[in-house]
Image: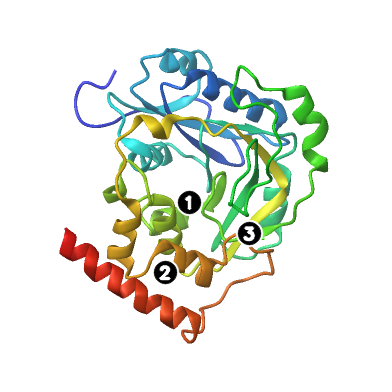
Amino acid sequence: MNQQGLISFHPSKKTEGIFSILIPSWNNLPYLKCCINSIKKNSVYEHEIIVHVNEGTDGTIEWLKERQISYSHSLTNVGVCFAFNAASVLASTSLILLTDDDKYFCPNWDKPLYDELKNLDHIYFAINSTSIEHKQTTNNCVIAPYDFGESIETFNEQKLLEDYAQLPFADWTGGNWYPMLLHKNIWTVIGGLSIEFSPGMGSDPDMMMKLWKAGVRYYKGVSESRVYHFISKSVSRIKKNDGYTQFLQKWGMSNSTFFKFYLHLGEQFKGYLSEPDLNGEIKNKFLRDKFKRVISFIKK
């Protein structure tokens, strides 16, 4: 038990695997069990699993100890930024996969990701699995709406396993959504998730911008690698930071500008991205963002 400092670290003896899968969890044991069990059951390869336990008053730590799963621990909920960063300390492989605990990993999810890496001769990538969600969304990066259950209690695993591979979708571009595969060297270079965005709103687009600044231009969402997303309600339990304004003030543009003109988030994958032409529509968008940024500082 952590009695001093913010976070304690509890590595297991088993450190073998292709990916080091990092999972933050906040008293969400039923979903965490489902997530980890699906990884163990449906992976082609062996992977290292590392959980960051926020609080863990629901039996999470005991369950992880029984299964010899590595974990980091904080007595309070420190948010996803600290959580992912802490879990990554225990990663023993060169490939880290960031994911939420409310994901069910479909059969063979890992092989398309690993095959993708074999086609690359560099480590400057952000490669994503594709989520299936039960309700309509404006997010062009997910397969929806396909309802296989809104919760663990209503989850129709058999129906999902029968249908998931036939759902039509194409590879997409842009990164930003979990599960996300990164090389540990690049994760270290960008400093992981920025803790000033704690407890986590806006930390994902901020990470994408840091990856861009580090030279990453290969952002690919792999359609064949699929997970089911329950859209758990953990976020509703926290006091949210204003991630939109923080991103705007830090980078001088809105996250929507970055998503549209740099990452082309949700568009069909066409290969490596390049610097945008700073004329026309993006120039006008920059001017609007500049005005919003000034106003945000005045209000602050």
Mark toward the start of the polypeptide (1 vs 3): 1
Q: Secondary structure at mark 1?
A: helix
Which percent across, then down, holds residue 67? Answer: 53, 17
User: Residue 271 sits in which quadrant?
Assistant: bottom right
Which percent across, then down, holds residue 129? Answer: 64, 47
| Residue that mark 3 sits on | 220
- Residue 210 vs residue 177, the one in the foreground: 177
- Residue 247 vs residue 236, the one in the foreground: 236
- Quadrant the N terminus occupies: top left
| Residue that mark 2 sits on | 213
Q: Secondary structure at mark 2?
A: helix
Which percent across, then down, holds residue 275? Answer: 51, 78
- Quadrant the C terminus occupies: bottom left
Mark toward the start of the polypeptide (2 vs 3): 2
Which amino acid, by three-letter code, is at mark 1? Lys
Q: In this rendering, would 190 be left or right of 74?
A: right
- Eyeballing the image, is 281 above or below 269? below
Query: Disc 1 and disc 2: Cα gap in Å?
Result: 16 Å
Q: Name the mark on residue 184.
A: 1
Which amino acid, by three-letter code, is at mark 3? Lys
- Eyeballing the image, is 216 above or below 68? below
Which amino acid, by three-letter code, is at mark 2? Lys
Query: Disc 2 and disc 3: Cα gap in Å?
Result: 17 Å
Crowd class of label 2 (few under 14; some 14 to 19; many from 20; radius 10 Å): few
Q: In this rendering, would 207 be left or right of 98?
A: left
Q: Secondary structure at mark 3?
A: strand
Q: Could you tell me which residue is drawn at 52 percent across and 39 percent down? A: 99
Which callout, 1 or 3, points to the residue nearer the camera?
3
